Amino acid sequence: MPQEDRPALNRRTLIASSLLLPFCLAASALARQPQPPRPPRDVQAWRRQLMAALQRRKRYPAALTLAAKASGQPSPSGKAELGFTLDREGRVLSASITRSSGIPELDAAALAMARPGTLLPKPPADLPDAAHEVRVPVVFVGGPASNPATAAPLGRGRP
């Protein structure tokens, strides 16, 4: 590389560096900011257990399935938010729908997942409060209605 090209290359590098410097400083400042504390591992494990227990209790309303089959329309889908309070032993003290799916039957099915008195996984000792407020989304997925006249028998495919 000839000597006269070097100052131009250095000048370009200097200009590019000066343009990037504010972004580098901002990224460095963000990296130094304290991050919010992560919940302890046993709290995370409890949340997974709680969600799994609720999922096992979830039932799509039979009335909606039957109505969909009778009408030939797809079963409705919806998302509700279930709020409930647990005591130290994992017993549900109270429950309510904090955000409706817009379909009363789905809301009632979500509420049935955590009726007062229901026993769910016990909160870990890391959560010191006597009662714990929990809010979880409950998603119900409907589907195509099956017409008994065109449904394949169990265990057999269509010809």
Image (tube, rainbow, N blue to C red):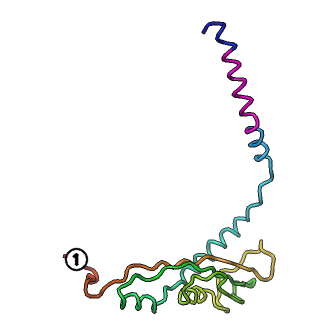
- Above or below, comparing residue 110 to residue 26 in the picture: below
Q: Position of residue 47 (x, y in %)?
A: 66, 72
- Residue at 67% over, 15% down: 8
Pick the front one: 93 or 27: 27
- Residue at 25% over, 83% down: 150
- Above or below, comparing residue 46 to residue 110 in the picture: above
How packed mark 1 is, by other alpha carbons closer than 10 Å (few <14, some 14-19, many 20 or more), is few
Q: Position of residue 29 (x, y in %)?
A: 79, 44
Query: Main SS of the magenta segment?
Result: helix
Q: Is residue 58 left or right of residue 14?
A: left
Q: Where does the N terminus fall, quadrant-wise?
A: top right
Q: Is residue 145 left or right of residue 94?
A: left
In the picture, residue 55 is in which quadrant?
A: bottom right
In the picture, residue 39 is in which quadrant?
A: bottom right
Toward the left, the furthest residue is 159
Q: Where does the C terminus fall, quadrant-wise?
A: bottom left
Q: Is residue 120 left or right of residue 33?
A: left
Toward the top, the furthest residue is 3
Q: Which residues are magenta?
A: 8-23
Is 13 within the magenta?
A: yes
Residue type at mark 1? Arg
Q: Position of residue 54 (x, y in %)?
A: 59, 81
SS category of the residue bearing label 1: loop
- Residue at 66% over, 7% down: 3
* Residue carrying label 1: 158
- Residue at 66% over, 17% down: 9
Is 95 within the magenta?
A: no
